Image (spheres, rainbow, N blue to C red):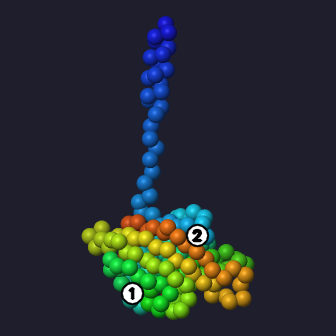
Amino acid sequence: MKKYFYFLSFLLLLTSCTEDVRFNNPAFQTLKDNTFWRAQIYKAGTETSGVFIIEGSLGYEKISFQLPEPSQKTYILGIDEVAKAVYKDTFSGQEVEFSTGEGKGSGQIIVTEYNTVENTISGTFKFTAINVDPAAEKQAAYFTEGVFHKIPVSSVSNFNTN
């Protein structure tokens, strides 16, 4: 009888051991001020002005990158207005915006893959963005270990130019 009990216990143990693996494909995530941040909505594409945008949003928060083109290369931030990163929180009453640009902020966006067959873009990023309100209490936001992976690139302009 003991043998049957052990055999059934062992069989139950084997059948209940499953791996519940979930892949983040696509993904847009980073450490925002050392706190994990993962976008729920992401997109990429070209604005009507010709600027290439990669965007990830989580509720009222949005991170967007402006690039001159979606080429595989490293874009340095804080040098000019051509390549820049923006973080916005549009929660009512607590609106805040941080940005890189000419002479403000620093960092880099590395496009590691631009797949024109599958229409996806992947890469990494890290940046320090400066508050657009110089009188604000918090003057900088820090984004490290950022990754965007297989973000769908739209062939139709689907971005607001705000």
Give the crowd class for mark 1: few <14, some 14-19, many >=20 residues within 10 Å: some
What's the residue at 73%, 78% (across, down)? 93
Instruction: Provide residue 143's location: percent of width, then percent of height.
Output: 55, 72
Front-lying residue, 59 or 65: 65
Residue with the mark numbered 2 = 32
User: Is 19 on the left or on the right of 139, as rendered?
Assistant: left
What residue appears at the point 44 percent right and 28 percent down from the top-left corner? 14
Q: Position of residue 62 (x, y in %)?
A: 56, 74
- Inspect the image, locate mark 1, and give the three-letter code of the amino acid beneath it: Pro
Q: Which residue lies at the image location 71% right of the left edge and 77% below the top edge?
A: 94
Q: Secondary structure at mark 1?
A: loop
Q: Which residue is mark 1?
A: 68
Q: Earlier in the sequence, mark 1 or mark 2?
A: 2
Q: Amino acid at mark 2?
A: Lys
Q: CB under 8 Å between callouts 1 and 2?
A: no
Cα distance between the residues tagged 1 and 2: 25 Å
Give percent across and percent down for residue 82. Answer: 44, 90
Residue at (50, 71) in percent of width and height: 56
